[in-house]
Structures are given as C-alpha cells and as structure tokens.
Amino acid sequence: MNDLNQTLFDRAKTVIPGGVNSPVRAFKAVGGTPKFITHAKGAHFWDANKQRFIDYIGSWGPMILGHGDPRVLEAVQKAALEGFSFGAPTEREIELVEMLIRLTPSMEMVRLVSSGTEAAMSAIRLARGATGRQKLIKFEGCYHGHADALLVKAGSGLATFGNPTSAGVPPEVVKDTLVLEYNNLEQLKQTFELHGNEIACLMIEPIAGNMNFVRASIPFMALCRELCTKHQALLVFDEVMSGCRVALGSAQSVYRKSLPGFEPDMTVMGKVIGGGMPLAAFGGKRAVMEQLAPLGPVYQAGTLSGNPVATACGIATLKAISEPGFFDALALKTQELTLGLSQSAKRHGVDFSADCEGGMFGFFLLPELPKNYPEVMKSNGELFNRFFHGMLSKGIYFAPALYEAGFVSAAHSSADIQETLQAADSVFQSL
Ligand SMILES: *Cc1c(COP(=O)(O)O)cnc(C)c1O
C-alpha cells in the first residue's frame, strides 16, 4: 500500500527539522514512520492512510474530554467569532483564574501564559527574584519544558538521544541547577545541608509523567516540604501534566490525603487547563506573585497570554471535568486498562508493572514499578518497541517512547478499552 504517512514525512523532513515540531513526535525512540493525523473525534484519531487509532496520548495530556467535545467546541466557536486576540484584558481571563484558584487553593494568585515551558521558566525567575537566591533543585527524569536553566539531564524528548544536556546551553546558565535523584531522601538532605541558604526553589513533578509514570513517595514529598520550609526555599510543583489530570485538585490534592494540610508554595500548570489550546499558568502565594511586573521587579509578559479563544477552551474544559463523578468514572476506566494489561502480560509470562491516578497511567515491561529515572531506564527498549509497534499496527496508539506516560479520556468507552486489551493479549503472546 502507498503509505501516505511516509509521503508526508518525506515532504516534512525537507522543510521542518526532523519533519516534526517537537522531537518525540518523530518516532525516533521506537523507529518507523510517524502517523500524520488528519482529524479526531472522541477517543479516536485517523492518520493520512485513513487508519483509525484509539488515542492514549490525548495530545500528551490536554484532551481529557476526548476530541471534539461539543461543549468545548461551542465555547471555542463562540469565542472565535468574538475575536482572536486583543492584547488587552478580558473577563474570561478572570473567570479561568478564579476557577483555577477554586480547584487549587494553594494558589492565591495566578498568571496565565501560553506554554508549560513559559510557565516553568517564569516560575523559576519569580522564585529567584522573590528569594534573592540563585540555586534551584530539579530531579533527574522530571521535565519542566525547555528553558535553558532546566535543560540539565532533562527527561522526555532529550533522553531519546541519550544526551544529558542540550547543545547551546551555556554552562554558566545551568551551574546553579542542582540535579538530584527522584525519591532519594538522603541526597536531598545532604544537598540542603550544603546549600540550604542558597536555594531559591525546589521544582518537582509530584507525579512524574516524563519518565513514564513515577510517584514521589509520601516520605520523600514530606521531606521536600519540610526542608523547603526550614531553609525558606520555595517548593514549586510542576503540575503541567498532572494538573487537573490525576484529580480535579491536581496531584497536590492526592498528597493531601496522606499529608494533611500539604501545599506547595507555587504551582505550574498547563495541558488540561487549556483543553488543547496553547494555555498554561503559574500561581502561588499572594506575597510571591505580587513580585511580578507591573507590581514588582520580576519581569514577565506575553503577547498572546490569556488568549480569549484559549481561555474559552480552558473554561469549558474545567467546567466539564468539575461535574460530579467525572474523576471517579475516569479513574475506574484507567484502572480497567492498567489492570487488564497487567493480567494479560502475566498470562503470557511478560514482566510487567503498571500504575495510574485519575486519567493518567504508566506501564513498564519491568517486574516492579521503578522509583527513579535510572530504574525506568532499565526497561528493555527493544521489547517495548516491539510492543509499541504491535499495538500500533492494531490501531492502538500508545506514547512512542518508553519514558512517556499515557492518558485516558472521558470519551474512551468500555468497547475501546476491551479492544485495546484484546490487541494487547495477542501482542504480549507474540513477544
Ligand atoms: C509538557 C510539560 C511541560 C512543558 O509544557 P509545554 O507546553 O510543552 O511547553 C513542562 N512540565 C511538565 C511536567 C510537562 O509535562
């Protein structure tokens, strides 16, 4: 058959570096030709060959309602008719921010931006400006977008190339970024003992989705909070992926179940809160947020920040996921998937472990769940690639890299999950 994906990929490669506008889309980790998507509806999308796929990436998280939810479509269409962008404030920005603050009360004030990268970068600048300190802690395997200071042994796209840092990042820009091992309590204690009074912030994905799916343990999270408080460093949660995805109150609400009163000082959000439009946010305590321009000395700005069409999309999405029972139903469906995959792998003697929270999941071709990046990378890449391509050929689209999480949407039906499990059963058998 004439592979129209290949035709498009060849054409793309002549004018777009690697043929893609974000590296992981190129299928470099798994090999083969990326699918060029023509359209999507509900839990499905179609490629250039008109093959239908069950979509488990959901645009890497945002599409929590599935594609083309009528409530969101209506809001976006109405907003588009009213105007694309004004460069002046709108009521919709207030409405979205008020919703975010209601859902995530650790944020007293929020600023809207257009990408997770921008939000994380701005949060770091604000943390440094507000504390007057330079150093920041990040964890190996956590991804916070591609700002220079955060491209230190970054996970996700970069890990594909086995390259711990990006070319073009001057060493002096990352010299204040301390990269630690996720879930390593001892190393964290030592780092704070050595550098406590120089640390502006500790940035962490509380449930990491860029080294597949790895949770910060409860004791580790409690220690992060304790040490940040003790040394007056800001605890910054990067919930760009986990935000409004693992729970309506984001990952911080999940930790609050075990750690009463638990709160980060700042939160970075993106993905779901824009419902598939370019929208992200960062927020925190009033005293910190008021350090931002025009009130304070920390500069931050954006031509399209708080875009009226994007905010309409975000508001409609947040309204829909706030309906009673939404997350319970989503979590059950996600559990049905991970449990079914686990049972199927077991039947065929394949090492397998899986975890999930809300509408986000991860699975590993490993006998036990990994706790940090080096453990994730012990996965057998060749085996994963065979699994991935086996599933893909049966119309099941999982993330094309073993260090990426997966996503279930409200639009996934029981039939979709069953079709996925049937496909997995025959692929596991062939492994
Ligand atoms: C996706 C992601 C980012 C970057 O967001 P972009 O919108 O791609 O710039 C940052 N942090 C986390 C945890 C993410 O998952």
Image (cartoon, rainbow, N blue to C red):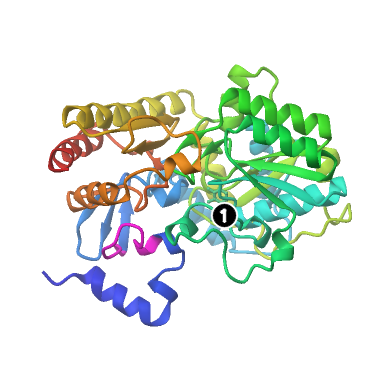
Q: Residue at point 48% right, 35% down?
A: 214
Farthest left residue? 1
Q: Is residue 341 above or below residue 295?
A: above
Q: Which residue type does callout 1 highlight? A: Lys
Would the CB of label 1 be found within 8 Å of ligand 1?
Answer: no
Image spot of residue 371 (x, y percent)? 49, 33
Q: Is residue 157 above or below residue 68?
A: below
Q: Residue at point 26% right, 61% down?
A: 47
Residue 30 belongs to the span the image colors magenta: yes
Q: Nearer the viewer, residue 299 or 184?
A: 184
Q: Secondary structure at mark 1?
A: loop
Farthest bottom residue? 14
Q: Is residue 261 above or below residue 152?
A: above
Image mark count: 1
Residue 94 belongs to the span the image colors magenta: no
Q: Is residue 87 at all visible to an observer of this figure? A: no
Image spot of residue 397 (x, y percent)? 29, 49
Residue position marked by numbered label 1 in the rendering: 153
Image spot of residue 334 (x, y percent)? 36, 31
Q: Residue at point 59% right, 63% down?
A: 83
Q: Nearer the viewer, residue 144 or 81?
A: 144
Residue 84 location, quadrant: bottom right
Q: What quarter of the picture does the C terminus occupy?
A: top left
Please report the bounds of the magenta region as a residue range: 25-36
Q: Nearer the viewer, residue 333 or 338?
A: 338
Residue 18 location, quadrant: bottom left
Q: Is residue 240 at all visible to an observer of this figure? A: yes
Residue 379 location, quadrant: top left
Q: Residue at point 55% right, 54% down?
A: 154
Q: What quarter of the picture does the N terminus occupy?
A: bottom left
Magenta highlight: main SS = loop
